[in-house]
Amino acid sequence: MQELVREELLSNPVLEDSAPAEGQSEEDLSAEGKEAKPEQEWQEYLEVHDPYMGKRLDFSEASEDGFFEKAPSNGITLKDHLMLQLQYLPLGERDKKIAEFVIGNIDEHGFLRVMERGDMSDEAFIDATVNELSALIGVSARDVTAAIAEVQGFDPPGVGARTSKECLLIQARQFAEVCPELAEGPALSGAEGNNPLVEGIISGHLENLAKKNYKAIAKDLGRPVEAVVEAANFITGHLNPVPGAGFGTEEARVVVPDLFIQKIGDEYAVFLNDDGLPKLNISPYYKKMLLSKGTVEGDAKGYIQERLRAAVWLIKSVHQRQRTLKKVAESILKFQREFFDSGLKYLKPIILKDVAQDIEMHESTVSRVTTNKYAHTPRGMFELKYFFSTGMSQSDGSHTTAEYIKERLRRVIEGEDSENPLSDQQIAEKLKEARIILARRTVAKYREELGFLSSSARKSHY
């Protein structure tokens, strides 16, 4: 929103920022402040003097339109990155169309996905993907295979792969071509600059690699453990299992809270964070120009009125957005008072509809207001969406949230013996002792969402 407001300040001469500049005090602006009039007077002026104003702009619904949330991101997507490379490829129009279709079916992780894998082997899934694309486009499997090969040569390395094994093999072979010095030595070198040990681990021992079971790999491939460790370090240090990571997102930056929840005495209060947000008002110069008869006429007057409409709309939108954000935060605070007092265990299961009904707004408005908005609280920094969660029953009949259960599950896994990690069923039994009843498959789901591997993959072997 700050970026959007600054852009409007640059393009709209009628709009001004009355916030003091660096080194300037509020008193320095007192003279201009005395001349300023409430924006409502300028809405009245527009309704009288501008035939286009009317009811076309409804400021009360500004946040409903999601105006600020629709501002586009500047981050390039993976698809855009691949399409740009395709433009410079010396292919005929027909082959480019096939390649475009292939790119269109690459997911955000960088993998080619046109069908569910099910229980197919890697080889069967690769062939089935080609056949599916061939049937969808109406071209031969040979043409599809050629298009996939072209796309797999694009940056980032490994993009367009259909399986993790294929993704890593593509990268290993490309790496050997561009960095042959890393393929030197008894562990990695091979004929024609390939990495036979690296490819052998990728082709048949990814599961053992994930478990760090180097002894099993060494025994199966007939190589020394030291060489296997060297090859494994090459794979984990230079190859990327998720080639599409990093696209379509902004650069990492510090999260700045949109509001603060502070405890004052026995009560909590919500304060909006207005730091960095310009204080908008209408330029006194253009005010006088419009109110002085005969000063400006014709197209010039129409232009100033149009800019005035845009300025008033933006000012009202900012104010409405801030008011709505505060109302939503105060409602969340009311529902989650016990959480702020006593911690995560007391986070209540509430949904967007509960807050929407409480503040008498539409559910979609609450959804937009809480998206990518952060609150700094005595319990830490939270996205407003964090406070909405469905409830789950406990053995004593009470309800708790999935967030609390996940946190308990995290503690169980982090406290386990790495040489004898707990299975999902054992984790379920541990949680049961804390009166949290979960099925084994639910434990597995939450474990994966938290980023923990299965018990066999967590086991320390070497």
Image (spheres, rainbow, N blue to C red):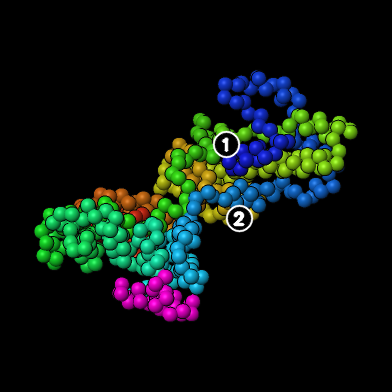
Q: Residue at x 82, y 42 (%)?
A: 299
Q: Bounds of the magenta span? A: 120-147
Residue closest to the eye, 418 or 338: 418
Q: Residue furthest top?
A: 27
Residue 34's spot in the image, x, y percent?
74, 23
Whichever of callouts 2 and 1 sits on the residue coming sooner in the sequence is 1
Which residue bears the numbered disc 2? 364
Q: Is residue 70 left or right of residue 127?
A: right
Q: Residue at x 50, y 73 (%)?
A: 94
Q: Give how far apart the Cα atoms at labels 2 and 1 are.
A: 21 Å
Corner quadrant of residue 167: bottom left
Q: Secondary structure at mark 2?
A: helix
| Amino acid carrying mark 1 in the image | Leu
Is 399 situated above or below 125? above
Residue closest to the eye, 452 or 412: 452
Which residue bears the numbered disc 1? 272
| Amino acid carrying mark 2 in the image | Ser
Residue 122 painted magenta? yes
Quadrant, the C terminus: bottom left
Q: Secondary structure at mark 1?
A: strand
Residue 119's spot in the image, x, y percent?
33, 75
Residue closest to the eye, 53 or 454: 53
Residue 146's spot in the image, x, y percent?
39, 72
Is residue 187 visible to the viewer in this orientation of the structure? yes
> Overall secondary structure of the magenta stretch?
helix
